[in-house]
Amino acid sequence: MKLLGRDIPARELMARIEERLRTRGLPTSEAVDIPAEGVEPRVEPLTFNLHALEDNADATRALPLQTHRGGVGQLVVVAKWAFRKSCQVFINEALGRQRVFNGHVRDSYAQLSAEVIRLRREVEQLRARQASLTTDASVEAAPEVATPEPASAPDTQEVLPKPRPAAANNTKRTGTPASTKPRRPKGR
């Protein structure tokens, strides 16, 4: 079992899991060797994805030949090998544009990853600067004790909205809005 990060005590976690399995009556697993240095370091996703794109950018590069079949499986592997050898020129021609596209995607991802890393660094610097400014401001403001001034009495006069002119109402003498009255067809 591989966990990410060094913050998780792997030995304690495994001991607790084994204990819970035993209390429920389930058999425990065989002994697992946990490396002395702890668990593997956390994987940085931007770098991992960039390496994965680099490894798989060339669509014309063949994957390893393998099979899950028994005795006939070896014949299938030989048939795949013969097909690749005889048709590799056509495969390269058919997948040439995909290879170029994958290269552009890989390069774009690398640029975006570099920009994300730069922006993260900049945000950390700004947060550190802001934290230092707030601590400096709190140290300077601490000796002074500000007393709040009493609030003045609120105005008791109400402000009424001004009436709208009759032309703005868009109503006729009947009081119904002009837009809701049906129109008569012309010519009758």
Image: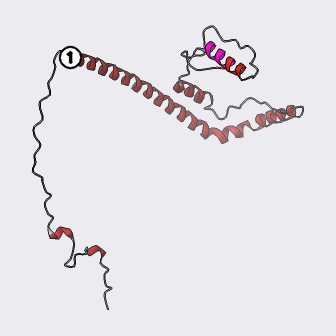
Asked if 155 appears above or below 169 in the picture, the reply is above
| Residue 181, percent from left and from top | 29, 78
Q: Is residue 55 above or below residue 11?
A: below
Residue 80 falls left or right of residue 41: right
The furthest residue to the top: 36
* Viewer-nearest residue: 65 or 96: 65
Q: Residues within 10 Å of mark 1 (few under 14, many from 20)?
A: few
Residue annotated with mark 1 = 142
Q: Is residue 76 left or right of residue 90?
A: right
The quadrant in which the N terminus is found is: top right
Where disc 1 sits, the SS reads loop
21 part of magenta stretch: no
Magenta segment: 11-18
Which residue: 63% across, 38% down? Answer: 96
Label tally? 1
**Which residue in the rendered view is the most extreme toward the right?**
71
Q: Quadrant of residue 37?
A: top right
How are the colours assigned in the image?
Answer: secondary structure
Q: Main secondary structure of the magenta part?
A: helix
Tell me what residue is drawn at x 10 percent, y 40 percent. 153
Q: Nearer the viewer, residue 8 or 35?
A: 8
Q: Nearer the viewer, residue 168 or 64?
A: 168
Amino acid bearing label 1:
Ala
Q: Left or right: where does residue 115 sit relative to residue 38?
A: left
Quadrant of residue 119 in the image?
top left
Q: Position of residue 126 (x, y in %)?
A: 33, 23
Point 56% across, 33% down: residue = 103
Residue at (65, 16) in percent of width and height: 14
**Quarter assignment of residue 167:** bottom left
